[in-house]
Image (tube, rainbow, N blue to C red):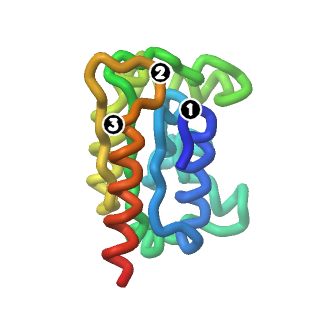
Amino acid sequence: TGFSAAGMFANRFAVLHPNRVLAAAVGAPGGWPIAPIADDELVYPVGIADLERLAGRSVDLEALARVHFFFFQGADDDNDSVPYRDSYPPEAERLIVRRFGKTPVERWPVAERMYRDAGLKAVFRLYPDVGHEWTEAMETDVLATFLHALKRKR
């Protein structure tokens, strides 16, 4: 699990190493969760199209389909790392804004649709009246996600 920059890490780690992850709780992942599709325009860290070139192997989509994802953020969260160069290069920022929206909340349903269309177990939740913060309700839902994944594993 992770929130903000740690959410970005949790998301990317789960996508890159799905055989090592049962469930991932990804909170406010820096404005854009990595797209789990091989659209040629969606290169790392926006997507996974070029991972074979970068890492010597592509994403194991079969293993990724077994990961239980829980994506969450506040509905008023405007903390966006997409414009910052320590998170995304300028071309990635332009691509994300052009294809997915100008704000993290605007991009949320697009990311949810991508995960659903990729056949992944992913729940996306926005918490009303919450900004860039971790709440007790989020913690409860994260724990429920992990408990559900553990029960399903048996």
| Percent of width and height locating residue 93 | 56, 23
Q: Whole-Å distance between the Cαs marked 2 and 3?
A: 14 Å
Task: Indicate the amino acid at tag 1.
Answer: Ser
Nearer-the-camera pick, 46 or 135: 135
Q: Which of the 4 image quarters holds residue 45?
A: top right
Question: What kind of element bears circle 3?
Answer: helix
- At x 31%, y 35%, the residue is 110
- At x 30%, y 31%, the residue is 126
| Percent of width and height locating residue 117 | 27, 54
Q: Nearer the viewer, mark 2 or mark 3?
A: 3
Q: Whole-Å distance between the Cαs marked 3 and 1?
A: 17 Å
Nearer-the-camera pick, 66 or 60: 66
Residue to which mark 2 is pinned: 132
Task: Indicate the amino acid at tag 2.
Answer: His
Q: Nearer the viewer, mark 3 or mark 1?
A: 3
69 is higher (above) or lower (below) than 63: above
Q: Are marks 2 and 1 in contact (CB under 8 Å)?
A: yes
- At x 65%, y 22%, the residue is 90
Question: What kind of element bears circle 1?
Answer: loop
Q: Is residue 93 visible?
A: yes
Q: Which tag, 2 or 3, sits closer to the chain's start?
A: 2
Nearer-the-camera pick, 133 or 5: 133
How many numbered marks have been drawn onto this rendered protein structure? 3
Residue to which mark 1 is pinned: 4
Q: Using a 10 Å C-alpha cutoff, classify the residue at mark 2 as few (fewer than 14 neighbours), some (14 to 19) or many (20 or more).
A: some
Q: Which of the 4 image quarters holds residue 150?
A: bottom left
Residue to which mark 3 is pinned: 137
| Percent of width and height locating residue 43 | 58, 44
